[in-house]
Amino acid sequence: MEPLIIITIFISFFCTYLAMPFWIKKAKQIGLLWEDMNKYQKEKNVAGSGGIIVVIGAIIGIFMYIAIQTFYFKNSDGISIQIFAMTTTLLLVSGIGLIDDLFGWKKGGLSKRSRIILVFFAAIPLMVINAGESNVLGIELGILFPLLAIPIGIVGATTTFNFLAGFNGLEARQGILLLSAMSIVMYLTGSSWLSVIGFCLVAALIAFYIFNSNPARVFPGDALTYAIGAAIASMAILGNAEKIAIFFFIPYILETILKLKGKLKKQSFGRPNPDGSLELPYEKIYGLEHVAIAILKKIKPNKKAYEGEVVTLINIFQIIIIILGFILFIRL
């Protein structure tokens, strides 16, 4: 990792950090404000869709990486094409997420069918360059890999990452953990250029988290959750690491199962009390967020679960899955 390459990661951080206050200010001016659903007094005072700034900030750093490779290292191999395909997919899914945000999640946003179709088209940049290898989990897919496996991977990761959300800092912290883990995997498997891309995204997420930590001043929106899911899937496809990526996604697979149990109609939020603690919103469990609330209320002496604790517990579960994934990965 040359010092010039590491600079690109810092560029992603500072671009996001410097632009986010401007976005928050403008969002308030135009009324792009959302309620903090896990707070007892719900007022529309939190800027929405800040995730689009994260994506743009990360991509600026990524483009700087391409420039350094081209003009300083004189490296003009096919990696740049793969990077442009990946960043195009990220911009497309983030734009789709932004449209979904503007339509309003309380009013249904985009229909489920529309989201799937649009995200499917967002996978086209990776499909047309025939990204990755067609042998997946020991099965040779041939032409079916770009035609089916790539779009299914992008749609699946984008959709499922969006399910585990709705708490201050949750999406950002989960994105930091997963993208950091995938970046390390890419470095260990010889795809160091993908690790740089991943850490540019991580740096932008860290800058965003400064404004998104509890109490949040800005929410990520689908503009960010779609992009993180697509980024993880893209790294897995381009780096031929589908197996470990799926393993890392176990919390999201479980979240999807619980959401399907509620027919995708039950929300992840808790039911806030005046003291800031959270209660289960339903009699049954419909998300890992609800599991975390139930566990905290059972194990804590005061029987109270708070938003930050819920996020931390989910993060701990994700870290355990990542560690287990690396153990299994090293053994292979």
Image (spheres, rainbow, N blue to C red):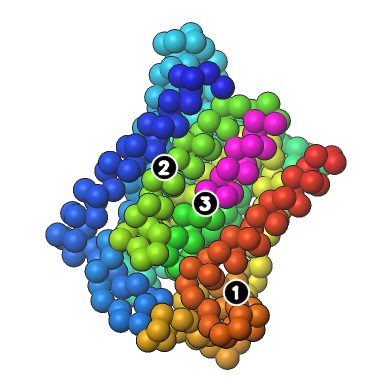
Left or right of 39 on screen, residue 167: right
Residue lying at the far front in this picture: please name it: 301
Label 1, secondary structure: give it: helix
Q: Residues within 10 Å of mark 3 (few under 14, many from 20)?
A: many
Q: Determine whether label 3 and label 1 are within 8 Å by CB.
A: no
Left or right of 218 on screen, residue 2: right
In magenta segment, residue 75: no
Query: Where's residue 242, x and y in %?
Result: 69, 44
Does 142 sit above or below residue 39?
A: above
- The magenta segment is 175-188
Residue 283 visible in rendering = yes
Query: Where's residue 300, x and y in %?
Result: 61, 80
Task: Quadrant for the C terminus, please.
Answer: top right
Q: Earlier in the sequence, mark 3 or mark 1?
A: 3
Q: Determine whether label 3 and label 2 are within 8 Å by CB.
A: no
Labelled disc at residue 292: 1
Nearer the observer, disc 3 or disc 1?
1
Picture residue at 58% right of the left edge, 43% below the top: 180
Label 2 sits on residue: 204
Label 3, secondary structure: give it: helix
Label 3 sits on residue: 175
Residue 132 visible in rendering = no
Query: Where's residue 237, x and y in %?
Result: 63, 39
Does 211 sit above or below residue 62?
A: below
Say which amino acid is labelled 2. Ala
Q: Earlier in the sequence, mark 3 or mark 2?
A: 3
3D distance between C-alphas at marks 3 and 1: 19 Å
